[in-house]
Amino acid sequence: MIIDTTPDRPRVLGEVDLFSAQVLVYAFVGHLYPADVRGTALGLSAGVGRVGAIVGPFLGGALVTAGIAYPWGFYLFAVAAVLAVLALSLVPAHAPALTGREAAART
């Protein structure tokens, strides 16, 4: 992720990266799940993302208030990132092929 840290320019690149990552999640979920459960899968993925958007700043603020934001804030969010990578490693890249009977049941 590219973050522009110069004081004379806004941090637009970092925000664009974050927005693009969420759009990619929607595209990935749409590709991976069949049409009959796609809405549920998209809702669940969006909900998990929103929970993270709420909990992250709350934890950061709690660490700052406790006076231990540095270095524990980094460690906490690094653990969250590692857990996210582990969770993503369990997700298949493509939806499994349906057998003839499963395909007929979906139509």
Image: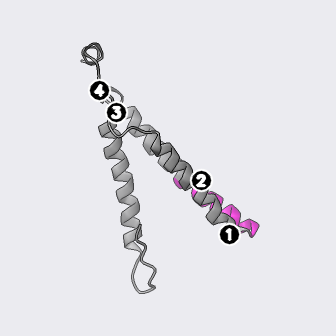
Magenta stretch encompasses residue 47: no
Residue at screen point 58% across, 53% down: 80
Quarter of the image with the C terminus is top left
As for residue 57 lying within the magenta part, the answer is yes
Q: CA distance from mark 1 to mark 4?
A: 46 Å
Q: Residues within 10 Å of mark 2 (few under 14, many from 20)?
A: few
Q: Pointer 4: what residue?
A: 97
Element marked by disc 4:
loop
Q: Which residue is mark 3?
A: 33
Check disc 1 and give the amino acid type: Pro
Span highlighted in magenta in the image = 53-67
Residue nearer the viewer, 85 or 52: 85
Q: Is residue 99 above or below residue 86?
A: above
Amino acid type, label 4? Ala
The three-letter code of the residue at mark 3 reads Tyr
The residue where tag 2 is placed is 55
Determine the main secondary structure of the stretch shown in magenta.
helix
- C-alpha separation, residue under disc 2 versus residue under disc 3: 27 Å
Question: Which residue in the protein does label 1 denote?
Answer: 71
Residue at (31% x, 45% y) in the render: 27
Classify residue 44 by image quadrant.
top left
**68 displayed left or right of 39:** right
User: Tag 3 or tag 2, which sits nearer the N-term?
Assistant: 3
Distance of mark 4 from mark 3, alpha carbons? 11 Å
Do the residues under discs 1 and 4 have CB atoms within 8 angstroms? no
Q: Residue 79 occupies which quadrant of the picture?
A: bottom right
Q: Mark 2 or 1 closer to N-term?
A: 2
Residue 59: x, y in percent? 65, 58
